[in-house]
Image (cartoon, rainbow, N blue to C red):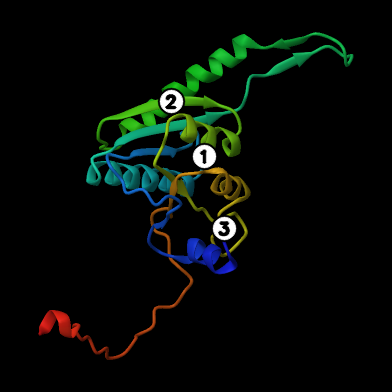
Amino acid sequence: MLSYTDWELLRQAPCPVLLVKKTKPYHRPRVLTAIDPFHQHEKPVRLDAALLNASASLATALKGTLQIIHCVPPPTVLTAGWVAGPVVVDNIKTDEMLKNARKALAAEVARHDLPSHKLAIVQGAAREAIPQTAKSGKADIVVMGALSRSGLKRVLIGNTAEAVLDALECDVLIVKPGKFQTKVARRSRGAQLMALPNAITG
């Protein structure tokens, strides 16, 4: 879907980048974003904050609705030692995981000043769960983050996000974490001559 130049724009642009896939204009759009309330490092914390702020701004400015989700692994499967053995799902562990996820998501979202919104826990890998949720919920805009990987000096989108970008049928807003600094040097364009069309001035 995207060329090399497109990917570099997503990686290096200091401002959010909106990828438009549909020609239909927004009318009270459904805005969807996925965060990870179990983050353990400073940078993911800043990214989640940036995602929530961008989602809130979109929903407010466009008079849309906001849904915030967190993707959790699918249920733990316990199987016998043979191929044809019965498949057993560890429901106790799954219920506990979902309960902790709901609590963590609610606590993270409560830290931010957001408009009216809905929270949901979605089971499954993010690369499948986010596009499925966006499609079933008829999302118009999905807000995603770009994050630099440890040991690398430039921002990468990440394998999961790249797969989600390809699978999504709606528009996508790519957001950088707070304090992001682009590696592209700012250059002066020099003096610019601005002229209005004759049809306007005449």
Q: Nearer the viewer, residue 131 or 56?
A: 131
**Which amino acid lies under the numbered mark 1 shown in the image of this protein?**
Gln
Q: Is residue 104 above or below residue 92?
A: below
Q: In the image, what residue occupies the spot 20% across and 83% down?
A: 197
Is 158 situated left or right of 53 in this image? right
**Residue tagged by mark 1?**
40
Contact between marks 2 and 1 (CB within 8 A): the answer is no
**Residue tagged by mark 2?**
120
Is 180 situated left or right of 115 in this image? right
Image quarter hosting the C terminus: bottom left
Please state which of the two labelled residues, at mark 3 or mark 1, is closer to the viewer: 3
Is 22 situated left or right of 127 in this image? left
- Estimate the x, y position of residue 99 in percent, counting from the top left: 48, 17
Of the two numbered discs 3 and 2 on the same chain, state the one appearing first in sequence. Answer: 2
Image quarter hosting the N terminus: bottom right
**Which amino acid lies under the numbered mark 3 shown in the image of this protein?**
Leu
Of the two numbered discs 2 and 1 on the same chain, state the one appearing first in sequence. Answer: 1
Where disc 2 sits, the SS reads strand
Q: Is residue 56 above or below residue 105?
A: below
Contact between marks 3 and 2 (CB within 8 A): the answer is no
Q: Is residue 155 above or below residue 121?
A: below
Q: CA distance from mark 3 to mark 2?
A: 27 Å
Q: Determine the image quadrant of residue 126.
A: top right
Q: CA distance from mark 3 to mark 1?
A: 19 Å
- Estimate the x, y position of residue 10 in percent, counting from the top left: 49, 61
- Estimate the x, y position of residue 123 in percent, counting from the top left: 56, 25
Please state which of the two labelled residues, at mark 3 or mark 2, is closer to the viewer: 2
Where disc 1 sits, the SS reads loop
Where disc 3 sits, the SS reads loop
- Estimate the x, y position of residue 151 in percent, counting from the top left: 62, 59
**Residue tagged by mark 3?**
156
